[in-house]
Image (cartoon, helix red, strand yellow):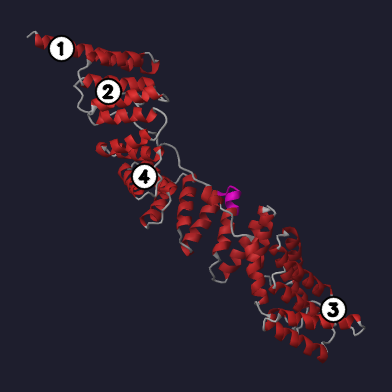
Amino acid sequence: MVMLTRMPEGAPIAKPGAVIAGAVIGGRLILRAGLLAVPVLALQIALTQVQTTLGLSASGAAFAQEQKKDTRETRRTPALRNAVYEKLAAAQAAAEAKDLAGAAAILDEMIAQKREGKALNSYELANVYNLYAFIHYSREDYAKALRAYEQVIAQPDIPLAMEINTRFTVAQLYFVQEQWQKGIDALLLWFNMTDTPNANAYVLLSQGYYQVKDYDKALANVEKAISMYKEKGNVPKEQWYNLARFLYFEKGNTNKTVEVLEELLTHYPKKQYWVQISHMYGEQKKDWQQLSAMETAYVQDMLDKGTELTTMAYLYLNAEVPYKAAKVMDEGLKAKAIEGKSKDWELAGNSWRQAQEIDKAIPAMENAAAKSDKGELYARLGNIYLDGDEYEKAISALKKGLKRGGVNRPDTAQLVMGMAYFNLKQYDNARAAFEKAGKDERSAEYAKQWINYMDSELARQKQLEEG
């Protein structure tokens, strides 16, 4: 509704929507881009876990002289002969000294002896290929490392613990090479063999299912990992929560997405989670929580992007706190954190106007209008000039807007122009403007009221002049 400042007593009061008073700030602000961020890739997790498994040293892939007895399956594992042990020890020492070529040469010689009839038993071969795998991995040749580990598994009668550990590493290396389904299949085989799967294994499986877009299984496994950690009194890892958050969001489960974000903010308070949870509160129609979450980030100087600051301003406007909205825009524009496009200045101008700071609304809307290629903002600027009793400027802005085109309601622009002419006592021009406005049925009644009022005012003035 237009503010008719210092209008004569008895003048028509503007009906709602009759005159443009600035952009409508209704509706709910739902920004989803931040929540669509892809969680940590399985490739990254797999690499980290492979490095942890191998220990980044030859000892991580070295042969095992003793294996803990496993009661689940009885295997008659061949012995590791002293001569073979000594060569493996030499190869391991070379590998730990980063002499990978020397280590590989020793292993090559052992394989060559096998070809010459000096057979290595299955357990000895498994240890040779295990060390080969470490060498290939150290060279970042993951395909060869994978083939070497598969040779380990292929040997009959190796210790069960050795097979279980190797199968887990094989699964991880499939993930490293982005062979997601093979990684999943290998990991499921490992789950069937082990009695003690840990939370990291469930997360790895979750990542695999995520990559093949089986979000239900991905979610079930990451939930299991989080639950296992919590049961032991530990704080689940941030990337686990993020994967769960993404999966809940993809499934459209807003309430669970919010729960995960609240957990993230409890243990890992960061700007991105404040912003995301603000948006999710908006989807839940929890307006005050939406504002509070965003404001928490704002008062901590976390909001540094223009879109974030304009979102903050819109939330303040929705909460009917226009002065704070105006201050956010003013500071952001001055610091150039907000780009300063026409729509940004328009938001600033509307905010100042709603805060009844007309002297600040005018320059903001002048910038907005100057940067726009349509006349609509000049029409709004004319409204603000009228509020500030700058009638000639109001007329000029309105004419410029109508000439440029693109004014949403030309009839209301003519009404405002008529009011400005009336205040300047240019009654003929005012009548012409009101008559143009009256041609639109939406403003016809209101324009007629103004003409009638103006006629009665002119008659009253004439009577006064005649004494």
Q: Quadrant of the N terminus?
A: top left
Q: CA distance from mark 4 to mark 1?
A: 46 Å
Viewer-nearest of discs 1 and 2: 1
Q: Amino acid at mark 3?
A: Asp
From the viewer's perspective, is residue 130 above or below residue 211? below
Q: Amino acid at mark 2?
A: Ile
Taking the spot 88% from the left edge, 82% from the top edge, the residue there is 114
Query: Taking the image as drawn, is residue 95 in sight?
Result: yes
| SS class, disc 2 | loop
Please provide the residue range marked out in magenta: 247-253
Residue at the disc numbered 3: 157
Query: Between marks 3 and 1, how big is the CA–CA gap?
Result: 115 Å
Binning the other alpha carbons within 10 Å of mark 3 as few (below 14), some (14 to 19) or many (20 upward) gives some
**Screen quadrant of the C terminus:** top left
Q: Of residues 68 and 310, which is closer to you in this image? A: 310
Which of the two labelled residues, at mark 3 and mark 4, occupies the earlier sequence position?
A: 3
Mark identifier at residue 316: 4
